[in-house]
Amino acid sequence: MKILVPVKQVQILDEDFEIRDDGRAVDPSYLEHELNEWDDYSWEAALQLMELHEAIEAIPLTVGPEESEEGLRKCLAKGGERAIRVWDENLEGSDQMVVARVIAAVAQKEGADLILAGTQSNDFGHGQTGIATAAMLGWSHVAVVSEIQYEPDSKKLTVKRELEGGVEEELELTLPAVLTIQLGINEPRYASLRGIKQAREKPVATMTCAELGLTEDQIGEAGSSSRIRRIYVPERGKAEIISGTPAEQAKRLLEIINELKGA
């Protein structure tokens, strides 16, 4: 079985930052990047399955420029033998639907049986990429997965997922499938010093959209279903503690209402 694990380097804002001149993103010089928290758990889930069953291969995948390779190296430092990065300039401005389209294309090219994606990302938090990937592939999908059981050669998975009120649901599904992984499904391991050194030598294959059979109208803003119009810091509100007697409080409340009406 081949498991594909999409991972992402999420954007972390400095305390002080500036918006780009076009108003559609934060100036990159004010951004730091780290591996998405949910992806850390999905990669650990893949590694645990790989360690239990010799016939399983787990491959981390990212869609991003060269600097996003750092996230792949962090994964490979914990386990796995190779990784995949997809990028070309035409992917600039892509939304989560385009990213899902790319992941689906890689899954088909690699002949993957299972995709383990994080439930959402720390930065934008759309929670749509894994679900959209399953839809594009026509595969089974289970969200917010908290446990995975797999029997070799069965082509079936038994999973548990979280519901409201602390209730869990147990499901059986047939591969191929996409699971979106919830926090707490496991305890992600730390990379050893030896693993970090070995990760530098492990191959990271780079693919372009053309190699995946994706055309320019399927990627970037042209292929996206949503577009960022602007990013801005909202105006801060203000609060006032009204003290005094009930009559004084009522009087001040009426003054505030009248002030707001005239604003």
Image (spheres, rainbow, N blue to C red):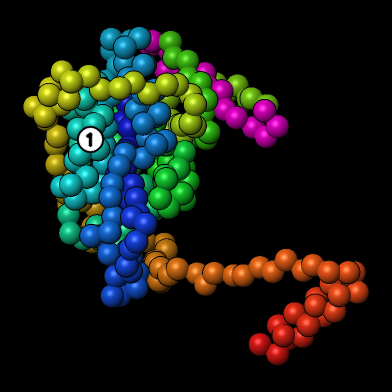
Is 188 in front, or is 120? Answer: 188
The answer to whether 154 is drawn above or below residue 207 in the figure is above
- Judge left or right: residue 161 versus residue 188: right
Q: Quadrant of the N terminus?
A: top left
- Judge left or right: residue 205 versus residue 42: left
Would you identify the image quadrant in which residue 6 lies?
A: top left
Name of the residue lying farthest toward the bottom: 262
- Judge left or right: residue 168 versus residue 209: right
Does residue 184 appear in the picture of this structure? yes
Is 229 in front, or is 27? Answer: 27
- Residue 54: x and y in percent read 28, 9
- Residue 240: x and y in percent read 69, 69
Q: Tell me the element at label 1.
A: helix
The answer to whether 92 is drawn above or below residue 166 in the figure is below
Kind of residue at disc 1: Leu
Would you identify the image quadrant in which residue 154 lies?
A: top left
In the rendered structure, which segment of residues is drawn in magenta? 152-166
Would you identify the image quadrant in which residue 153 lies?
A: top left
Q: Quadrant of the C terminus?
A: bottom right
The residue singled out by tag 1 in the image is 72
The answer to whether 161 is drawn above or below residue 260 in the figure is above
Name of the residue lying farthest toward the right: 247
**Mark 1 Cα within 10 Å, few/some/many (few <14, many 20+)?**
many
Find out whether residue 161 is within the magenta segment: yes
Name of the residue lying farthest toward the left: 201
